Image: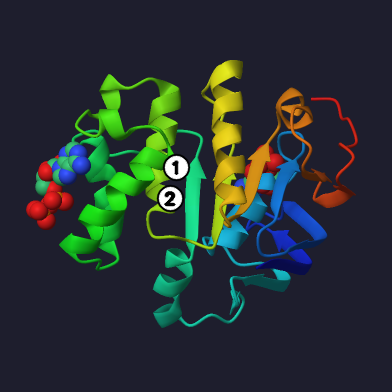
Amino acid sequence: MVQLIDVFKAYENGTKALKGVNIKLEPGEFAFLVGPSGSGKSTIMKLITGEIAPTDGTVVVNGFNLVNIKMSKMPFLRRSLGVIFQDFRLIQKKTVYENVAFAMHAVGASPREIRKRVPYVLNLVGLDQKAKMRPFELSGGEQQRVAIARALVNNPSLIVADEPTGNLDPARSLEILMLLQKINELGTTVLVVTHEKALVDAFSQRVIAIDNGRIISDGMDGYYSYEE
Ligand code: ADP
Ligand code: ADP
């Protein structure tokens, strides 16, 4: 599903962001990726989505080896992957329904498939009553649920969320993580990046901790505490 093997990443300016990272996420797993600011979390997310390439090592996502993936295969990787961001990234001019439908349209789904699938995912995230609203009419938590519906709509096998609760209050943050946990229980592999320890502690899930470009712990029993 996701496998990073001895991954190193140095940016153009010489910054060594990852120094030999190994992570294996099995199909159907849920994991948090935690660590202080600058530890390498976003770098790992960008490697998984294929946005950047490693300097050394192997990255395999949903059966695609991202180190030697052909450009023609990239759309298939993208389709097998749902991505959620801190700032939602919704289209403000489109309704909730259209934001989600657009993601299906973009991969060539038929109008019939779209009409069937979009109401299902909006119901799953609890937004079926808000389908005709536009993002600016919604709360932050609701906007993030639209983004989750959009990430889910093409039925990806993996969802990666980069600080999905960074713009939300604690109660809303908890709701979003419970929703991601529910989606995981329905069969999707989920990887959530966060630096909010209190939030992670509220869930009994696998926690992969990174510091200064190295994995410092990985397991079900909480994580090494660090100073921000
Ligand atoms: P995190 O997501 O945990 O905050 P990042 O993966 O963004 O960490 O960053 C890891 C390290 O790489 C930091 O030292 C950061 O300054 C550096 N870095 C991130 N992106 C770039 C870039 N495009 N160019 C140079 N250095 C970068
Ligand atoms: P088309 O029939 O043009 O292929 P759709 O049936 O997907 O497209 O949608 C047509 C319009 O109706 C869109 O603007 C969409 O916002 C709206 N719409 C369709 N279904 C719903 C729904 N369940 N809830 C809210 N709006 C919907």
Residue 85 picture location, percent across and down: 49, 40
Q: Is residue 221 left or right of residue 163?
A: right
User: Can residue 156 be spotted in the picture?
Assistant: yes
Q: Secondary structure at mark 2?
A: helix
| Relative vertical location of residue 77 with respect to residue 144 in this rendering, above or below | below
Q: Nearer the viewer, residue 33 or 39?
A: 33
User: Which amino acid lies under the numbered mark 1 shown in the image of this protein?
Assistant: Ile
Residue 217 picture location, percent across and down: 89, 47
Residue that appears at 86% across and 36% down? 222
Q: Is residue 20 left or right of residue 29?
A: right
What separation in Å lies between label 2 and label 1 (alpha carbons)? 5 Å
User: Can residue 94 be spotted in the picture?
Assistant: no
On residue 148, the disc is 1
Disc 1 under 8 Å from ligand 2? The reply is: no
Residue that appears at 19% across and 32% down? 132
Residue that appears at 34% across and 32% down? 127
Q: Residues within 10 Å of mark 1 (few under 14, many from 20)?
A: many
Count of marks overlaid on the render:
2
Residue 118 picture location, percent across and down: 29, 49
Residue that appears at 66% across and 54% down? 44
Please give the residue where the numbered disc 2 appears in the rendered image: 151
On residue 93, the disc is none
Quadrant of the image containing the N terminus: bottom right
Q: Is residue 180 left or right of residue 82?
A: right
Mark 2 and 1 residues: CB-CB less than 8 Å, in contact? yes
User: Which amino acid lies under the numbered mark 2 shown in the image of this protein?
Assistant: Ala
Residue 170 picture location, percent across and down: 61, 17
Quadrant of the image containing the C terminus: top right
Q: Nearer the viewer, residue 156 or 213?
A: 156
| Relative vertical location of residue 32 with respect to residue 195 in this rendering, above or below | below
Indicate the colouring scheme: rainbow
Q: Secondary structure at mark 1?
A: helix
